[in-house]
Amino acid sequence: MMQSLFDKDLPRRHMLQSLGHGFGGLVLGAMLHRESGVAAQSDGNGIQGSIGPGAALQGLHHPPRAKRVIQLFMAGAASHIDLFDFKPELVARHGQASNFGERVEAFQDGLGPWLKPIWDFQPYGQCGKRISEPVAELGRVIDDIAFVHNMVGKTGVHSQATLLHATGFQLPGFPGMGAWVSYGLGSMNDNLPTFVVFPDHRGLASNGTKNWDAAFLPAQHSGTVIYPGSENPIADLRPHKSGSYITNASESDGQSLLASLNRRHADIRPGDDRLEARIRSYELAARMQLAAPEALDFSDEPEHILRMYGLDQIPAEFDKEINAREETIHFSRKCLAARRMLERGVRFIQIWSGNDNGFPRRNWDSHEDIHRDHGPLATGMARGASALIQDLKQRGMLEDTLILWTTEFGRMPSSQGGKGRDHNPYCFTNWLCGGGIKGGVSYGPSDDFGYKPLDRENPTQVYDIHATIMHLLGIDHTRLTVRHNGIDRRLTDVHGHVIHDLIA
């Protein structure tokens, strides 16, 4: 990559033209095409749902309520009954032998005595919703949130359950939800990816990159991984320090040669879109060299915004032990970076909390000790998510930005080893906010113990959440399909119903 690309004063078009006959010419052509305009539809209330360049859809299926999505994913399985779904019956029966009234298949035989919520619950907001102490910061925005307490999964295995939420299928090889949104609606910006992923700073969750891969969709719709706050937030965005020998002339010659080889390659492989996807990725890389560093630079954020996110005082070094302050900084960085990315036209952002390796636990998989694991993670998550919601709201962006909080499954109302909880795929909680969602409501109650939905015949499935998100984006989830291996594939497989009770 050319050293001149890092000159902030270099005009965008001049930089691209300087790439000669290589990818820069392709970039410039694409930019000029984008600047000629994009299709848009309005819901009559001033909210625009754009169909951008590269979109598979020719137009929205119905007026949208949202045009952007943020998915907050708690990797490891957060405990609904310790955070959001208060169960007085567990308090009353704490320590008694658990009796589920049926044979229970537990992941690690965590069927000890009933275990009351680890923290006290208090009511917040005009809606009076009770949430627990570690997530109390969400009380500031509780009237904007809709909780879904009767979620059910298909498995208690982390990898499969995570894929179900991320891609709509339990097996690998299917596009992530963000990839579907990128494919269907196209881009809203020239210089940043349509789908961005902020992993946990400690590493990736179950399945790694398969959670945001484009699979059989064109490869440019895969999520782009970014680590806000790290020395190199985007891998290979800039040349290595040892690459001082790279000059403008050598870069131009190299790009020219690559363009010639690519044309020859494409001519003898008609119908193969992998090269086109690769070219698009190089185009985007060139543009991101200018746009991404600015989007991730918080130096122009006012003090009161940094304070709201808990980023006003960041220690030079973090403690070796997991703590709430450290988790707040890491999660809030991603939330603030997400807001800045959304402002610049990124359409889908995935923020992860928790990774798939390390011990003691550094994720939400609290088999041993809910207090130790959930406490810091939940406190940091709640501060960042609350600040993000407040920030979007004060900027007028919450009304067309849809936020989904999810986790692969819940945790059992019985104890495991006295202080932990086993997996519970039979019931868990999601919550949604903004983008046409009705705030201050709780939908689909669970039973007295938080073990299963109260109405076992009509639970809410992951497909229903996905269908509702697509609906709010102006997409009929049954009509955005791709023929693959003889099957018309879609995000919701052959399932899914829009939850109209959640829509304002």
Image (cartoon, rainbow, N blue to C red):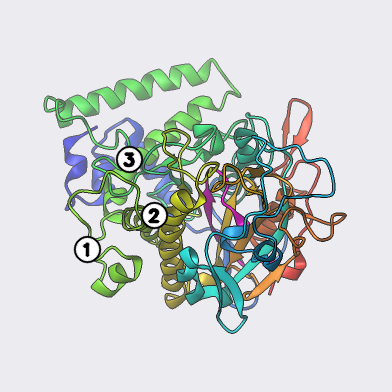
In the rendered image, which residue does mark 3 sit on? 234
Image disc number at residue 33: none
Residue 64 in view of the camera: no
> Mark 1 falls on what kind of element?
loop
| Amino acid at the residue labelled 2 | Phe
In the rendered image, which residue does mark 1 sit on? 313
Quadrant where the image shows the N terminus: top left
Image disc number at residue 331: 2
User: Residue 143 occupies which quadrant of the picture?
Assistant: bottom right
Q: Earlier in the sequence, mark 2 or mark 3?
A: 3
State the image coordinates of residue 478 (x, y, percent, origin top left). 77, 49
Q: Residue at x 50, y 74 (%)?
A: 139
- Whole-angstrom CA distance, mark 3 to mark 1, is 24 Å
**Structural crowding at the residue carrying mark 1, measured as other residues with C-alpha within 10 Å and reported as few (<14), some (14–19) or many (≥20):** few
Q: Residue at x 54, y 32 (%)?
A: 207
Q: Are marks 1 and 2 in contact (CB under 8 Å)?
A: no
> Mark 3 falls on what kind of element?
loop
Foreground residue among 447 and 436? 447
State the image coordinates of residue 501 (x, y, percent, origin top left). 76, 70
Q: Relative to residue 327, is residue 15 drawn left or right?
A: left
Residue 356 in view of the camera: yes
Q: Earlier in the sequence, mark 3 or mark 1?
A: 3
**Eyeballing the image, is 231 above or below 128?**
above
Q: Which residues are magenta?
A: 63-80
**Structural crowding at the residue carrying mark 2, measured as other residues with C-alpha within 10 Å and reported as few (<14), some (14–19) or many (≥20):** many
> Mark 2 falls on what kind of element?
helix
Q: Does the magenta-highlighted stretch encompass residue 72?
A: yes
- Whole-angstrom CA distance, mark 1 to mark 2, is 15 Å
